[in-house]
Image (cartoon, rainbow, N blue to C red):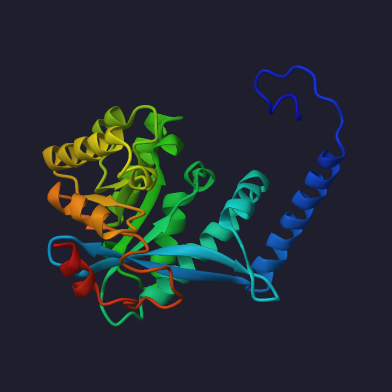
Amino acid sequence: YRAKGSPGEDICFYEKAMDEAVRQRRRVTQGLRDALENEEFELYYQPQVSVDNNEITGYEALLRWRQKDGSFISPADFIPVAEDTGLILPIGEWVLRRACEEAKHWEKTLRLAVNLSPVQWGHTDLPRLVHQVLIDTGFPPSRLELEITETAMITDMARSTFILRQLKALGVTIAMDDFGTGYSSLSTLRAFPFDKIKLDRAFMGELEDNSQSRAIIRAVLTLGESLNIPVLAEGVETVDQLNFLREQGCDEVQGYLLGRPNRRALPLVPYDAVLAEAS
């Protein structure tokens, strides 16, 4: 399996680290089962802010796994294991249900953004699950935005189109996540009825030193305007980045500059002051 998973390598020799990797994977898998059963998962919310009027438009729900000592295991470490083992299906349902339950009690009726795993997207019962969660929680479909990456959709275009139409028929909105990192983003936008484009955070990190990243951001924002699809830029951490996005006509922003993920969906910084500094 090591050879199969290593492009260009036909032969692999045993290494002690292989055993430890397998043991660690088993520990994480069992830990995920226990965490789901014992309610060890938590949701944190990161604000999404309108560049135009400086107001919070919604929050993205982010999954966190707290350990007994108070530390957290990074999603980058446990989400791949959850996807490979199929545990992402019950975990993903828990996230959607809990997020809708908590967001229903927010003081303001803001948008709730929830990520969908490619494994969830490939499950035939996804539209039924979303519908059932909305009924059970009483959460308004118009406030729910589901985020899915392009790579999860292009495997079976016909099936993805069918699922998208079913979800949109429920009244929820759909955002293409991590835009700009896929292989056929333009054709995907043409093929599917997206309500929002989320520009991948990688472009923000390269904004100051990479002219190509700036050119791509301009092109994506122009594309969004032409197609009448709002664009949200992720990973905004500096005032200079925010200034650039404002000058280029970006619709919404999300990142540490505007607010770090928090257990409660409340403003963490004076947004007007931050955006005023950037203007």
Relative depth, front residue between 162 and 150: 150
Residue 248 is situated, as x and y percent measured from the top left of the image, at 15, 46
How many numbered marks appear?
0
Residue 118 is situated, as x and y percent measured from the top left of the image, at 50, 43
Relative to residue 212, is residue 250 depicted above or below? below
Residue 186 is situated, as x and y percent measured from the top left of the image, at 27, 30
Residue 105 is situated, as x and y percent measured from the top left of the image, at 36, 81
- Residue at (72, 55) in percent of width and height: 29
On screen, residue 84 versus residue 218, left or right, reads right
Q: Quadrant of residue 161?
A: top left
Return the residue found at the far front.
209
Q: Identify the image quadrant of the C terminus.
A: bottom left
On screen, residue 91 versus residue 239, left or right, reads right
Relative depth, front residue between 180 and 174: 180
Relative to residue 167, is residue 37 depicted above or below? below
Q: Identify the image quadrant of the N terminus.
A: top right
- Residue at (28, 37) in percent of width and height: 192
